[in-house]
Amino acid sequence: MRRLACTCLLPFASLAQAGFSGNVAVETQTYTESAQFDGQFDDNVTFSFEPRWNGEWNDGNDLWSVELFLRADNKDAGREHADLRELLWLRIDGDNEWRVGVNTMFWGVTESQHLVDVINQVDLVEGIDREEKLGQPMLHWKRYQDWGVLDLLVLPGFRERTFQEAEGRLRPPLVVDTDQAEYESSDEDAHVDFALRFSQTYGDLDLGLSLFDGTSRDPLLLPGTDAGGKAVLIPFYEQMTQFGLDAQLIYQDWIYKLEYIHRNARSNDFNAAVGGFEYTLYGVYESDLDLGLLLEYSHDDRPENDRGAFDRDVFVATRFTFNDQQSSEILAGLIVDVDKGSRSFRVEGSRRFGASWKAILELQTFSNIDGDDVLAAFEHDDFLLLELAYYF
């Protein structure tokens, strides 16, 4: 009995020895033009806190991790939220890995958009670049073999997308009423989704094939009214099956990238792809600077009114990697809709200060936006964002 009790207490003993890290940050966002819709603000200040705990036991074969995210905003109540990004137990058993709990994960290789990345829901109030995600409950089995890596995921429970409220910028002309969210499945947000992925490296080629069946993370936004009779958009989450392919080939100083999906849903049966290359010039003018040149093209074969933001777009970007002690980086990219001529320009830069501080800058502009483009609601929302974060 005593030995059993000690064994059961091992995970709790590791809690006391847990690693603790994370960051706190203050962020200011300023818009350069007056708001397009009534009640929207021109600037705001936010505070975020992202703590993380992790530990292990059983000689490192069992690991656990917890990651939280909290944001407070002085004007935009829609951005004030908290999320459990991770609450995970990882078991390593030879060629097998078992993950149980809440996790965030990423699939894909391209820069301008991530078509095959369908496991986690987007935390849209954190930014229109869709890089931030909500934690997803999952049972995840991963097996390593000579012939490749196999991932099998069971996803119980669904996370609805976050949207800006009426006073927020970078939102549709009508507010999205998340309280009226609808589902195609009678199980609604309790539907159990499934995903399967095979990946392998063949020389310089990294290849991934994936299959997802379940609730679409991308809601249809349908017209409706709220309790007061005001026009709103109602998110509708349909069921879908998606096949995905992602590939990355490294050849000398070139990296060729491709993502392709075929998605079948009640609203549409369509194909979409994004592909291109990144070429890196190392040690420009015998300095420590590396200069990356990126070009990608996106295509979506849905009818024009049903396409997303990336339908027939060209993405051109430059990446500056300074290779200094401050880990300074800048990425500047332009997206042009080849049909409508709409343009979106974005700059992202970061630099560390000392051992614990990091400054981040983001600049986003929209120009020549066609009235029928999905970006038309953002044409007055050019902004400059500055963030100062302390890491511990």
Image (tube, rainbow, N blue to C red):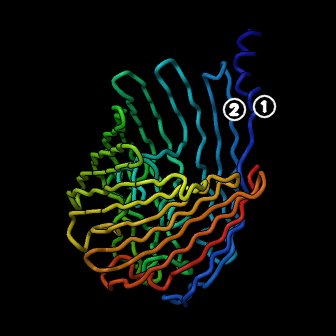
Q: Distance between the residues labelled 1 and 2?
A: 7 Å
Up/down of 194 relative to 344, above or below: above
Location of residue 78 in the rendering, given as x and y in whole percent from the top left corner:
58, 71
Up/down of 177 relative to 213, above or below: below
Q: Name the residue under label 1.
A: 17
Residue at image position (66%, 63%) is 71
Q: Mark 2, residues whose alpha carbon is within 10 Å: few (<14), some, or many (≥20)?
A: many
> In the visual, does 372 lie left or right of 171?
left
Residue at image position (70%, 75%) is 74
Residue kind at label 1, given as amino acid type? Gln
Q: Name the residue under label 2.
A: 55
Q: Can you tell which quarter of the image residue 384 is in?
A: bottom right
Up/down of 136 relative to 175, above or below: above
Quarter of the image that includes the N terminus? top right
Residue kind at label 2, given as amino acid type? Gly
Disc 2 secondary structure class: strand
Disc 1 secondary structure class: loop
Location of residue 216 in the rendering, given as x and y in whole percent from the top left corner:
35, 54
Location of residue 76 in the rendering, given as x and y in whole percent from the top left corner:
62, 75
